[in-house]
Image (tube, helix red, strand yellow):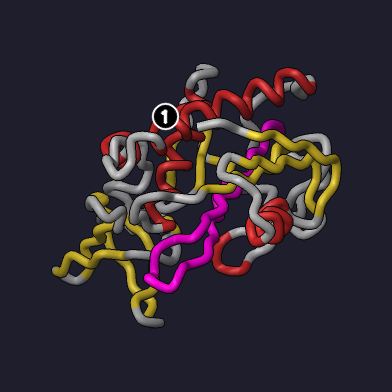
Amino acid sequence: MKFDLHFVETIDSTNTALKALAKDGAPEGYVLTAERQTSGRGRLGRAFFSPAGSGLYSSLLLRPKMPIRPAALTCLAAVAAAETVRSYGKDCRIKWVNDLYLDGKKVAGILTEGALDQSGQLRYAIVGIGFDLNVPKNLPASLDPVVGGIFDRPLSASEREAFLLRYLERFAGYYERLPEIAFWEAYRNLQIVFGRRVAFSENGTPKSGVAQSVDRDFRLLVCSEGALIPLERGEVTFIAPQEGD
């Protein structure tokens, strides 16, 4: 897989911009990376805090030639990203479905978007990822307890590019083996949710349970009220242990 790298200082959203380029015929492997996003987006319609000087915000355009669900691409990206961070000696883990955690704090998030053709297959997919290379400055109070940084010093431009290339090479290594899901075992082994009590929503109903595992379709299996519930999407939050648990 060949990459066509493009760097900008400021953009509204790398995913939004790359969507427009994809519609105009940009090739697979087009990578758009920004120093800062003014309207960064995360999953579930949330804003993604993307200030200058601390992060690396990048989107990759894919044109899959085989059936693949966007959720699987998200999980592929999570494994590639976690392995990249771990290659620097950091014990990075994955919180289902798309967040990377280091020392108990979130250091990266992933957003996969795409367009379907008339047969229902992906015409293109955009895998966006935001890395907090350092703890962002001027964090909103709501994010301060949960957002961390991968490194304890700012990286030079060449170091940032080397980090990005290391991630892209790992991504390509798994992507080129599709439809073999060679990253499933790694995705499962890197989870921080198993055995933890979590809160979630099923069909709009708040529930809680204990996260057990991830199946081959990357659904989180949660034991709740004696039943094993497979979660395909959404979000889980950790629940502090109750007395007697």
Q: Nearer the viewer, residue 30 or 237?
A: 30
Q: Is residue 22 visible?
A: yes
Magenta region, residue range: 109-134
Residue furthest out toward the left: 226
Q: Nearer the viewer, residue 48 or 183?
A: 183
Note whether 37 is above or below 160 in the view shown: below
Taking the spot 38% from the left edge, 58% from the top edge, the residue there is 69
Which quadrant would residue 40 be assigned to in this image?
A: bottom right
Which quadrant would residue 181 be assigned to in this image?
A: top left
Amino acid at circle 1: Gly
Taking the spot 34% from the left edge, 76% from the top edge, the residue there is 202
Q: Main secondary structure of the magenta part?
A: strand
Taking the spot 76% from the left edge, 54% from the top edge, the residue there is 140
Q: Mark 1 falls on what kind of element?
A: helix
Asked whether, in this view, residue 160 is left or right of residue 70, the answer is right
Residue 59 place in picture, x, y as percent: 63, 46
Taking the spot 33% from the left edge, 56% from the top edge, the residue there is 197
- Look at mark 1 in the image and give the residue it sits on: 173
Note whether 233 is above or below 105 in the view shown: below
Let me know if residue 111 is in the magenta part: yes
Q: Quadrant of the C terminus?
A: bottom left
Let me know if residue 182 is in the magenta part: no
